[in-house]
Image: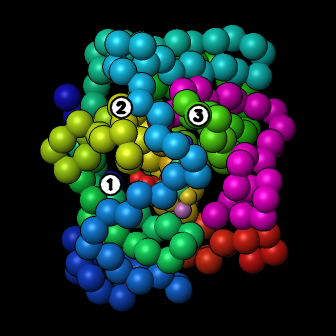
Amino acid sequence: MGIVSPGFSGRRRGGAPDLPPGQYLTEDFPVLSAGPTPHVPKESWNLTVTTETGAAHHWDWAGLTALPTERFTVDLHCVTKWSKLATAWEGVSLDTLLAGVETSAEYALAHSYGGYTTNLPLEDLLDGQAWIAVRYDGEDLTPEHGGPARLLVPHLYLWKSAKWVSAIRLLNEDHPGFWESVGYHNYGDPWREQRYWGD
Ligand SMILES: Nc1nc2c(c(=O)[nH]1)N[C@H]1C(S)=C(S)[C@@H](COP(=O)(O)O)O[C@H]1N2
Ligand SMILES: [Mo]
């Protein structure tokens, strides 16, 4: 089991250098969901990755949790302006998940139980930047925060971190997700304050 802590580079907690422009610090963990919370039992949970050629890869709960997991501590930045620093998670790196997936796609579209979608460049899921998170703060991830498993891509605004993730489609063309198609920025870099189209 690998233990890594990307994103926690010893920066001073609560210091301005940790806060992207326009953000404020919060200690609690707000819940932001566009619809009702799906309750997906681990026994019926499934994750599918499809490639641009139509190849499909499936993981059930046993398959996912048999993969090496990582512990990581990262800062979260929501477009509604709260940031929560040094949050502790456990999950499977997308590098691990996608290691056996052959693709030359440039884009990814994440899908959730309940219908939510969000898009991002595939390279933003790789190189230690993204996880399928299954535990938060030492506990199984609660349904409100996306349990049993959510995508976590902390270097982008948190709407890119699809809760209750069910599928990741790897695509040759970019396809805007739920918020991206109603005016949120297509990429969503908090450090460049890319909140809305045109930012
Ligand atoms: N499936 C799904 N994932 C989602 C959302 C959602 O509505 N549905 N909301 C997004 C937004 S806007 C944010 S800020 C974060 C909130 O995560 P949290 O509720 O764990 O704080 O989840 C993101 N992932
Ligand atoms: Mo958000």
Mark identifier at residue 114: 3
Q: Is residue 59 left or right of residue 148?
A: right
Query: Of 10 and 92, which appears nearest the observer?
Result: 92
The colour style of the image is: rainbow
Residue tagged 2:
148
What's the distance in space between the residues labelled 2 and 3, CA to CA? 14 Å
- Label 2 sits on what residue type? Pro
Considering only vertical position in the picture, is 112 above or below 87? Answer: above
CB of mark 3 near ligand 1 (< 8 Å): yes
Visible in this render: residue 153?
yes
Quick one: label 3, few (<14), some, or many (20+) residues within 10 Å? some
Of helix, strand and loop, which one carries label 1? Answer: loop
Quarter location, residue 196: bottom right
Considering only vertical position in the picture, is 22 above or below 54? Answer: below
Question: Which residue appears farthest toward the left when viewing the image?
Answer: 138
Mark identifier at residue 6: 1
Please state the horizontal and vertical placement of residue 145, each as a whole percent of the image.
38, 47
Q: Does the magenta run of residues contain 183?
A: yes
Please state the horizontal and vertical placement of residue 13, each as a whole percent of the image.
23, 78
Question: Which residue appears farthest toward the front when viewing the image?
Answer: 36
Pick whichever of labels 1 and 2 is earlier in the sequence. 1
Q: For the magenta stretch, what is the residue range?
A: 164-188
